[in-house]
Image: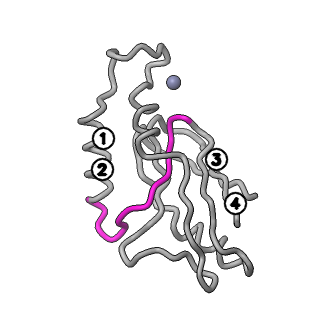
Amino acid sequence: MEVLTVKTLRRCQFIDITNEISELVAKQSNAKAVLLYVPHTTAAITINENADPTVTQDILNHLEKMIPSGSHFRHSEGNSDAHVKSSLIGASILVPIEAGSLSLGTWQGIYFAEFDGPRTRKLYVQFL
Ligand code: ZN
């Protein structure tokens, strides 16, 4: 398993990691899929459109409207909104590999989703 470091710059942010993952995939001759796993409770990973950057801005804005940060949560650390957002987006994705490349759709990109940054995060990359 490989462990990538992802440095986030804002409290909530989607970071396009498609190229970094594609470079790792290109070095794997026998892998049929790659599992990407976020070992954190206030960050996540997802696939969505990477052609128009307003899509990820809309996702972040809508998550903030649905789950605003604030003091209306019981968890005393003050970041419950980040825990909820992380669970909604999810901690892992599995992407098929075909002929040494990620089998992504034309408009798809892989995003690391930060909800309680800025932080230095880990991403586990397991080839299957
Ligand atoms: Zn917490």
Q: Are marks 3 and 1 in contact (CB under 8 Å)?
A: no
* Gap between marks 1 and 4 measured at Cα: 29 Å
What is the CA distance from the residue labelled 2 to the residue labelled 1?
6 Å
Task: Choose the circle earlier in sequence order: 4 or 2.
Answer: 2
Q: Where in the figure is residue 101, as x and y percent of width and height?
A: 58, 80
Q: Identify which residue, 55 or 86, lies in the foreground.
A: 86
Q: Amino acid at mark 3?
A: Lys
Residue 119 locus on image (x, y percent): 55, 39
- In this rendered view, identify the residue nearer to me: 4 or 128: 128
Residue drawn at x 47%, y 34% as measured from the top left: 116
Q: Nearer the viewer, residue 108 or 16?
A: 108
Instruction: Give the quadrant of the C terminus.
Output: bottom right
* Badge 1 amino acid: Leu
Are discs 4 and 2 less than 8 Å apart at CB? no
Q: Is residue 36 left or right of residue 51?
A: right
Give the residue at mark 1: 63
Q: In the figure, 110 relative to 91: above or below?
A: below
Magenta residue span = 41-54
Say which element carries label 2.
Answer: helix
Q: Which mark is residue 126?
A: 4
**Which residue in the structure is indicated by mark 3?**
122
Q: Nearer the viewer, mark 3 or mark 1?
A: 1
**Screen quadrant of the N terminus:** bottom right
Q: Quadrant of residue 35?
A: bottom right
Counting residues from the start of the chain, the first of labels 1 and 4 encountered is 1
Looking at the image, do the residues carrying marks 2 and 1 touch, with CB atoms under 8 Å apart? yes
